[in-house]
Image: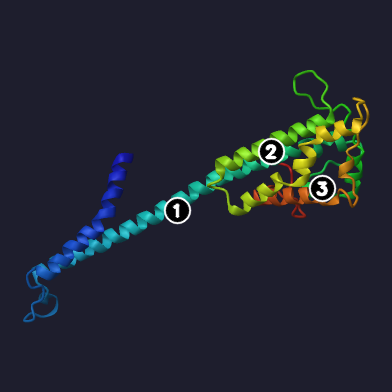
């Protein structure tokens, strides 16, 4: 059925110029098409009617090709939109994966509500709570290895895996995602907080333990101060913007939320 349809489409591509050429030849070299002695429609000779029929066929086939092309364009656009929707959903999952330990209620449950949106993490009180987290302490998460997982390892792993998922998604769906989504997502990937803080959190912790493997290391670079403000604020704003472009669920205040459809 598909092959027959393809053959029909190919025929439509060539039919209009062929029919139009036949009509033009008939108009130039054919018999008289107009009888001046007759009246009304009788003035049109049999050959004249033939030329009209050929011209009508040319018109119909041309309109058929135009209609077919428009339907094909609509189908291609809808297919591209569906694929792009898959890509944006994958990006939303990857965004959430990259920061899920920070958004987890394990940090917030005894002090305040967990953040529903990246923009909630700009709240000074939440930043104060986050800054006191001992990165060298045991994380409540487990990976099935039965080994102790410290917070800094959990944060770095999530950031690394999330970044890899984002990069892979961009590579797969690059031809379908909008330039705005590509730009916003790339800015998240190359933000200083993600690249130099979360992805290198092991180095920061190691530099601050001073060879004491159990020394507490607070999450000090999320503190609300002049030194750390730019990187921290930029990251969550970039993330919120990218999530909004990817169609994230929104709160009543219009903030993109971590929850997925």
Tell me: 91 left or right of 135: left
Residue 209, image x and y in percent?
A: 91, 30
Residue pictured at 57% horizontal, 48% vertical: 177
Label 1 crowding class (10 Å Cα cut-off): few <14, some 14-19, many 20+? few
Q: Earlier in the sequence, mark 2 or mark 1?
A: 1
On screen, residue 163 above or below 183? above
Residue pictured at 8% horizontal, 81% vertical: 36
Q: Is residue 63 at all visible to an observer of this figure?
A: yes
For the N terminus, the image quarter is top left
Tell whether label 3 touches label 2 (CB within 8 Å).
Answer: no
Residue 235, image x and y in percent?
A: 77, 48
Name the element at disc 2. Answer: helix
Q: Nearer the viewer, mark 2 or mark 1?
A: 2
Q: Earlier in the sequence, mark 1 or mark 3?
A: 1
Q: CA distance from mark 2 to mark 3?
A: 17 Å
253 or 247: nearer the viewer: 247
Q: Is residue 261 at all visible to an observer of this figure?
A: no
């Amino acid at each position: 059925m598909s092959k027959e349809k393809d053959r029909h489409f190919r025929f439509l591509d060539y039919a209009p110029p062929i029919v139009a050429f036949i009509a033009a030849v008939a108009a130039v070299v054919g018999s008289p098409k107009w009888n001046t002695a007759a009246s009304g429609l009788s003035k049109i000779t049999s050959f004249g009617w033939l030329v009209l029929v050929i011209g009508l066929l040319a018109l119909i086939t041309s309109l058929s090709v135009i209609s077919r092309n428009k339907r094909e364009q609509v189908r291609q656009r809808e297919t591209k939109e569906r694929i792009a929707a898959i890509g944006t959903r994958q990006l939303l999952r990857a965004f959430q994966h990259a920061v899920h330990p920070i958004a987890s209620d394990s940090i917030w449950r005894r002090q305040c509500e967990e953040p529903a949106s990246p923009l909630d993490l700009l709240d000074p009180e939440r930043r104060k709570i986050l800054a006191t987290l001992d990165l060298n302490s045991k994380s409540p998460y487990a990976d099935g290895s039965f080994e102790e997982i410290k917070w800094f390892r959990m944060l770095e792993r999530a950031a690394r895996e999330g970044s890899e998922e984002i990069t892979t998604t961009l590579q797969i769906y690059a031809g379908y995602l909008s330039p705005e989504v590509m730009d916003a997502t790339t800015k998240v990937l190359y933000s200083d907080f993600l690249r130099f803080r979360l992805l290198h959190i092991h180095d920061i912790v190691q530099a601050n333990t001073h060879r004491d493997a159990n020394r507490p290391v607070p999450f000090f670079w999320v503190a609300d101060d002049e030194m750390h403000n730019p990187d921290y604020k930029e990251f969550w704003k970039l993330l919120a913007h990218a999530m909004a472009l990817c169609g994230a669920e929104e709160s009543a205040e219009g903030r993109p939320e971590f929850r997925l459809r």
